[in-house]
Image (tube, grey):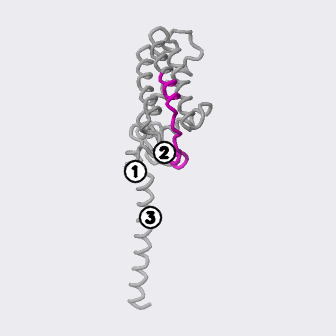
C-alpha cells in the first residue's frame, strides 16, 4: 500500500469519526444536557434524584416525555370557564381553614379537571397527566404532585383532620405550590404557546 493510499484512509477514517462525534453532540444538544436542565428546571433535579443521581437515566426519561408531549397544544379556556375555575379555587382556599385535608383533595381534583380542559391527558391517568404537565409547566408541576400524593395518603384518613402523618403546615405548603400551577393553567397569556419553556 502506497503512502498516499495510507494517508487517504487515515483522512477518511478521521472524517467519519468527526462526523459521528458531531452527530452525537447535535443530538445531545437537542435532547440532553444543559438544554434539558434549562427546560425542566426543578423537574430535572427531581428526576435525577429519583434515579439516584443517574443523570443519563433521568435525561432518557425527560427526553421521552418531551418526545411524547412536547407538541401538545394547550386548548384555550373560555372566559366563563376561567372564572368558574377561579371561583372554585377560592372556595378551596376558604375551606382550608376548617378542613385542610378536604381542601387539598378538592385542589387535586380541580387541577386534574383544569389540566384536562386544557387538553392534557385526563386525570384518570395521573402519571401521564403529570408527565405532560412537566413538559409545559415544569416549574410548577411538583406542587400538583405533592397535593395528589397527600390526597392519596389521606384517602383512608379521618374527615377534616390532617391524618396520615401530614401536618397542616405541609398541606398548606403543598396547596400554595399547587396554586402556582393552577394560575399557570388558567393564564390567558399561555393559551397559544406550544413550548412555553423553550427559549
Query: Residue sitting at 47 percent across and 40 percent down?
Result: 191
Q: Which residue is mark 3?
A: 23
Give residue 139's position: percent from left, percent from top. Answer: 40, 36
Residue 175, relative to residue 4: is it above or below? above
Do the residues bearing badges 2 and 1 touch, measured as CB atoms within 8 Å?
Answer: no
SS class of the residue under badge 1? Answer: helix
* Label 3 crowd (10 A; few <14 / some 14-19 / many >=20): few
Start and end of the magenta stretch? 64-86
SS class of the residue under badge 2? Answer: helix
* Label 1 crowd (10 A; few <14 / some 14-19 / many >=20): few
The residue closer to the viewer here, 129 or 9, is 129
Query: Residue sitting at 49 percent across and 17 percent down?
Result: 92
Q: Which mark is residue 62?
A: 2
Q: Which residue is mark 1?
A: 33
Give residue 121's position: percent from left, percent from top. Answer: 59, 37
The residue closer to the viewer here, 129 or 170, is 129
Q: Does residue 82 show up magenta in the picture? A: yes
Q: Earlier in the sequence, mark 1 or mark 3?
A: 3
Residue 130, relative to residue 155: is it above or below? below
Give residue 124's position: percent from left, percent from top. Answer: 62, 31
Give residue 99's position: percent from left, percent from top. Answer: 50, 10
Amino acid at each position: 500500500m502506497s503512502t498516499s493510499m495510507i494517508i487517504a484512509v487515515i483522512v477518511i477514517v478521521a472524517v467519519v469519526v468527526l462526523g459521528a462525534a458531531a452527530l452525537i453532540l447535535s443530538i445531545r444538544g437537542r435532547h440532553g444536557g444543559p438544554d434539558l436542565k434549562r427546560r425542566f428546571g426543578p423537574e430535572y433535579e427531581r428526576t435525577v434524584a429519583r434515579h439516584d443521581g443517574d443523570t443519563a437515566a433521568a435525561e432518557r426519561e425527560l427526553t421521552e416525555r418531551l418526545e411524547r408531549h412536547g407538541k401538545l397544544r394547550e386548548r384555550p379556556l373560555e372566559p366563563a370557564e376561567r372564572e368558574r375555575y377561579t371561583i372554585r379555587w377560592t372556595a378551596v382556599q376558604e375551606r382550608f381553614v376548617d378542613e385542610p385535608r378536604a381542601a387539598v383533595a378538592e385542589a387535586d381534583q380541580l387541577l386534574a379537571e383544569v389540566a384536562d380542559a386544557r387538553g392534557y391527558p385526563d386525570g384518570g391517568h395521573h402519571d401521564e397527566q403529570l408527565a405532560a404537565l412537566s413538559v409545559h409547566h415544569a416549574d410548577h408541576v411538583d406542587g400538583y404532585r405533592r397535593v395528589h400524593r397527600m390526597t392519596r395518603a389521606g384517602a383512608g384518613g379521618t374527615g377534616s383532620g390532617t391524618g396520615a402523618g401530614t401536618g397542616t403546615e405541609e398541606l398548606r405548603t403543598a396547596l400554595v405550590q399547587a396554586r402556582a400551577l393552577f394560575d399557570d393553567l388558567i393564564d390567558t397569556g399561555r393559551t397559544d404557546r406550544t413550548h412555553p419553556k423553550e427559549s
